[in-house]
Image (spheres, grey):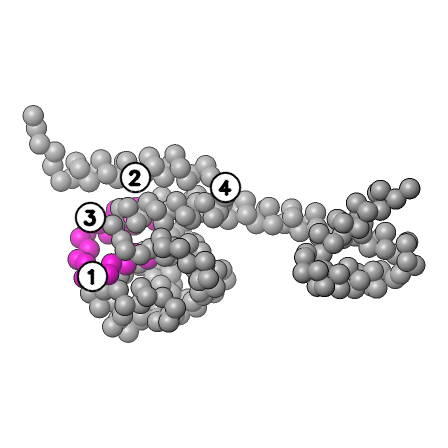
Amino acid sequence: MTKKTGNTIKKSQELSILKEIIETISYNLDLKEVLARIVQIVSGVTRADSCFLYLVDGDTLILRASLNPKPLEINSIKLKLSEGITGWVARNKKTVAIENKAYDDKRFKFVNSLPEDKFEGFLSVPIIYRDRVLGVINVQHSKPKKYSKNEVVLFELVAKATGGAIENALLFSEKEALKEALETRKVIEKAKGILMKEYNLSEDKAYKLLHKKSMDKRISMKEVATAIIISNEFKP
């Protein structure tokens, strides 16, 4: 039996990963699920102790997913495109691989809430789709880690392959957010009309009343408006 060469194994691994991306990510439009799956795939490929995925929002990178649960940090940790190794990677569209003492790199940005700031190995790759940087994926190793050329190439391949899925999920997310905003506006407008008629209020005062109720009860204005509409429908 002929023994597989290193290149054959590498190609087989690439095809396996691409197949997994196509099957589990490419057709998923839930952004949160897409990002979580990408982090899992990347962590498996690199055997990382930590994996962070940042998305670009204007001139800022926002942490959107991580291998280890970080509910307080997700969406809260933000970096300018001029900050940290992550910002450098996004701005220059280039990969950075650091074998040890990544925290000593002059580009490194410390975030006091992250124990990963003390990790040794650091590999950071931009997520590029149609020549536009969508974000950055970072993997870290607690001990020194020499990143081989094959590992870096494979990591870059994964980042490139997931770009389209992220773009699709982002567009769907924006579309859903717009749909929700329009629906909320309709409900609030209808509730305002009920209050204006019921209590002889001006449009401005009706809106302020809705806002006050929302603040007092600590629920959204849409929920307050919906309750008013339902209550009005059951009036004799």
Q: What residue is rendered at 32% in x and 66% in y?
A: 115
Q: CA distance from mark 2 to mark 3?
A: 14 Å
Of discs 1 and 2, which sits in the foreground? Answer: 1
Q: Quote the CA–CA distance across marks 1 and 4.
A: 36 Å
> Mark on residue 150?
3
Toward which corner of the image does residue 11 lie, by quadrant? top left
Which of disc 3 and disc 2 is earlier in sequence? 2
Q: CA distance from mark 1 to mark 3?
A: 20 Å
Q: Which residue is labeled 1 in the image?
A: 143
Q: Which residue is mark 4?
A: 29
Contact? badges 3 and 4 (CB < 8 Å): no
Kind of element beneath mark 4: loop
First in residue order: circle 1 vs circle 3: 1
Local SS, label 1? loop
Q: Name the kind of residue labelled 4 in the image.
A: Leu
Distance from disc 3 to disc 4, alpha carbons, whole Å, reads: 30 Å
Spatial CA span between label 2 and label 4: 19 Å
Q: Are marks 1 and 4 in contact (CB under 8 Å)?
A: no
Whole-number angstrom distance, CA of label 1 to CA of label 2:
25 Å
Q: Nearer the viewer, residue 236 or 209?
A: 236
Q: Which residue does the numbered mark 2 point to in the structure image?
A: 17
Residue sitting at x 11%, y 37%: 5
Corner quadrant of residue 65: bottom left
Q: Is residue 230 visible?
A: yes
